[in-house]
Amino acid sequence: MRFIKTNMIILCAMGVFFSSAWAAETGWKKIGESKNITGYTRTTTKSSIDAMKGVGMVEAPVAAVEALIRDIPAQTEYMYKCKEAVVVNTPEFKSIGDTVYVYNVTSMPYPVKDRDAVAKATFSVDKATGTVYVHVEGFKTTYNQDQKKVRMPLVIVDYTLAPKGPDKTEVTYEALADPGGNLPAFVVNLLTKNLSIETISSIRKMVKKDKYKNIKAVVTTTAH
């Protein structure tokens, strides 16, 4: 009997531990809804900056949204304060197919220095469902680094593009971006908490442009 009770206690303790760990990984807090786009934030052990997430429907096929995300220079038109975005293609960083290296500059108000980052974007597709995944992660490099900008120490972005009909895509946008420097975390969190909603809202507008709206075929081939 004592053995059974002891094992029950252990199992309960393990249940609490794993449920807490799971909650820590998935503990998104809803911060609002606008234009039928829901925004969330959560704390993370990776940074003092909160992660953000937005979920909303885009009136366009997955292929059109995918084409927009692959159009790296277009980031200046729909990403917050994006000043420059270019594909990096060097002997060290080869952009080909479903792997794309990106150099991005975010403008900041004077006297704060602009922020920049070099990141690797990986595209994959679930061929059974048609869902396209994009994972973007910054990494340490001296590529194009100079004293006029602060290299961001952490950049992680994930897009999930799930088909919900021939011309509808549910877009999930998750981002964790630490601008580095001496900017207070609470100020950054306050200024960026709605960015996931605004990003999806901007994607909605962008995919209506002629160069995206008629694209019907997904080009990503790497299996998720």
Image (spheres, rainbow, N blue to C red):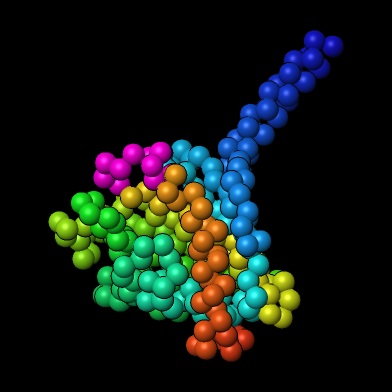
Residue 46 among those drawn in magenta: no
Q: Position of residue 47 (x, y in %)?
A: 41, 41
Q: Residue at x 68, y 23 (%)?
A: 13
For the residue pair 64 and 57, the one nearer the viewer reads as 57
For the residue pair 185 and 156, the one nearer the viewer reads as 185
| Extent of the magenta region | 180-189
Q: Is residue 148 above or below residue 64?
A: above
Furthest-right residue in view? Answer: 1
Q: Residue at x 40, y 52 (%)?
A: 177
**Corner quadrant of residue 215:** bottom right
Q: Position of residue 86 (x, y in %)?
A: 32, 74
* Image quarter hosting the N terminus: top right
For the residue pair 1 and 69, the one nearer the viewer reads as 69
Q: Could you tell whether 152 is left or right of 59 in the image?
A: left
Q: Residue at x 23, y 51 (%)?
A: 112
Furthest-top residue in view? Answer: 2
Q: Residue at x 77, y 20 (%)?
A: 8
For the residue pair 63 and 223, the one nearer the viewer reads as 63
Q: Position of residue 41 (x, y in %)?
A: 54, 46
Q: Could you tell whether 176 is left or right of 151 in the image?
A: right
**Corner quadrant of residue 133:** bottom right
Q: Position of residue 101 (x, y in %)?
A: 36, 70
